[in-house]
Amino acid sequence: MNAPVNDFTPAQWETLKDQYDFCCLYCKRKFAPELLTQDHLTPLSRGGSHTMANIAPACHSCNCSKNDKTAPEYFRYLSA
Ligand SMILES: [Zn+2]
């Protein structure tokens, strides 16, 4: 993976999903754990890292439409 820092572990992913109560960061709906995808708050394509601090659970639909926006950009896009 082409990220400046790349230290995200499967255990951290489990912790994150639990912290978010298995809800998508963006639409706030609750999903089965296997339906949550790893969203990079700052996308890898924009220089973001593959670390716990830069990852949040998102559903497939939100992650797809977020695409290469940052999290703040996507929140603005959602509220526009
Ligand atoms: Zn969602």
Image (tube, helix red, strand yellow):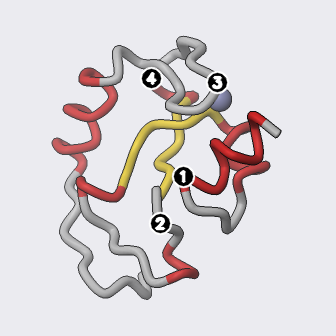
Q: In which quarter of the image is ligand 1?
A: top right
Q: Type of residue at label 2?
A: Thr
- For marks 2 and 3, give the CA distance: 18 Å
Q: Is residue 53 left or right of residue 56?
A: left
According to the image, label 4 marks what residue? 33
Residue denoted by label 1: 71
- Mark 1 in CB contact with mark 2 (< 8 angstroms): yes
* The residue carrying mark 1 has its beta carbon less than 8 Å from ligand 1: no
Ligand 1 closer than 8 Å to label 3 CB: yes
Q: Which of marks 4 and 3 is in front?
A: 3
Give the class, few, some or many, for how many residues have Cα within 10 Å of label 1's Cα (few <14, many ≥20).
some
Whether label 3 touches label 1, CB < 8 Å: no
Q: In this view, does 80 lie to the left or right of 10?
A: right
Q: In this view, does 70 lie above or below 71?
A: below
Q: Name the residue under label 2.
A: 42
Residue at label 3?
Answer: 27
Q: Identify the amino acid type marked 1.
A: Ala
Distance between mark 2 and mark 4 Cα atoms: 22 Å
User: Which badge, 4 or 3, is on the more N-terminal residue?
Assistant: 3
Q: Distance between the residues labelled 1 and 2?
A: 7 Å
Q: Image point 35% across, 14% down: which residue?
A: 21
Cα–Cα span, label 4 and label 3: 15 Å
Residue 53 position by quadrant: bottom left
Kindly identify the amino acid type of the residue bearing the numbered disc 4. Answer: Pro
Dot 4: what SS? helix
Residue drawn at x 59%, y 32% is: 26
Q: How crowded is mark 3: few (under 14 residues within 10 Å), some or many (20 or more)?
A: few
